[in-house]
Amino acid sequence: MSGVFLLVGLCLGAILAMALIPRSRPGPAAVAAAASTDTVISVEAEPDPVEPSPPPSSSAAPGPPPKSVDTEALADLVPGGQVSVVVYDRVAKKTTVSLKSERAYTSASLVKLLIALEALQAGTPASTVQRMLSVSDDDIASRLWTALGGPAIVTRWAGKIGLGGTRPPEDPGRWGDTRTTAADVAKIYRYLLDRAGAGTRTTIMRALSGATENGSDGVRQYFGIPDAVGSLRWSIKQGWACCRGSRILHSSGTVGEDDRHIVVVLTSQPVSTTYTGAGKQVSEVVRGLLPAIDGL
């Protein structure tokens, strides 16, 4: 019987020992067994990142095409007369608008640009040259014309700059009757801005940017470029003359920052057109050029 009680005691001891082993702390054998099997670890999934929407493609909703200059319409703005135009972009280094650019016109006061170049080369005080240009002073122009060789001024500078359509006046004393073209006037500005000495360029461009509203003869010279380009920066040399068969009104100069655009508009209009009316027509021509000047 003692053997039976011993066996029962051992069994009860084993059962009691098993009950006392914590279930939350597996032994080394259990850990090894778990490591040897494929185990799936459950981790809370992060949401997929949201990709930003791509910007709308410009090709998907194209805007209106860039405006262009209708050169045929420009001619209609000067009824009964003639108009020639050149716009040269100094950044793009190309002519962006050209209308009958080789047609010859009486230069009127535009020849003062050549007189100014000659005068500064000859040592004329800058203040004298600037006044001749800014108020379009005919008396100063006449004195310099006579003192510096008259028609020879035109011949010399036409050769130096390459002005194929510019000729001295038939009457040597009438400097305003010099003949020129829109293409040649644009070349004068290109020479002045890109090739002339810094002192010459500064003197002349300062005078053109400071052009007064009225010329020395009382004529309003803010037609064309200054009347049409709004807040854009400009420098101008205008020309007007009447009445040997036609009324001449020209607007020339630069428009935009750093003198980017060279703009030349030459017109010959009927004598019956008033000065005010002719000036408005030149201004309308320049307004027609705005798409090439500032993309309006």
Image (tube, rainbow, N blue to C red):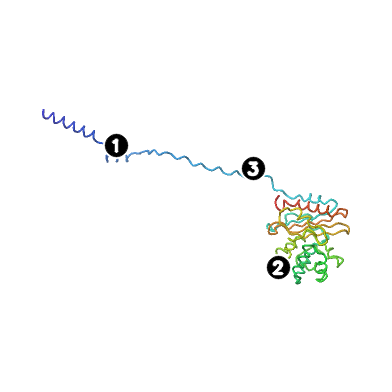
Between the C-alphas of marks 3 and 2, the distance is: 51 Å
**Callout 1–callout 3 Cβ contact below 8 Å:** no
Give the residue type at disc 1: Ser
Q: Residue 285: percent from the left, percent from the top? A: 78, 52
Q: Quick one: which residue is furthest to the left in this view? A: 1
Characterize the local packing of mark 2: few (<14), some (14-19) or many (20 or more) Cα atoms within 10 angstroms: few
Quick one: label 1 or label 3, which is nearer the N terminus? 1
Looking at the image, residue 29 sits to the left or right of residue 138; the answer is left
- Circle 3 residue: 61
- Residue 172 falls in image quadrant: bottom right
Give the residue type at disc 3: Ala
Characterize the local packing of mark 3: few (<14), some (14-19) or many (20 or more) Cα atoms within 10 angstroms: few
Looking at the image, residue 207 sits to the left or right of residue 278; the answer is left
Characterize the local packing of mark 1: few (<14), some (14-19) or many (20 or more) Cα atoms within 10 angstroms: few
- Residue 106 falls in image quadrant: bottom right
Check the image and report above or below for 170 versus 41.
below
Check the image and report above or below for 292 versus 43.
below
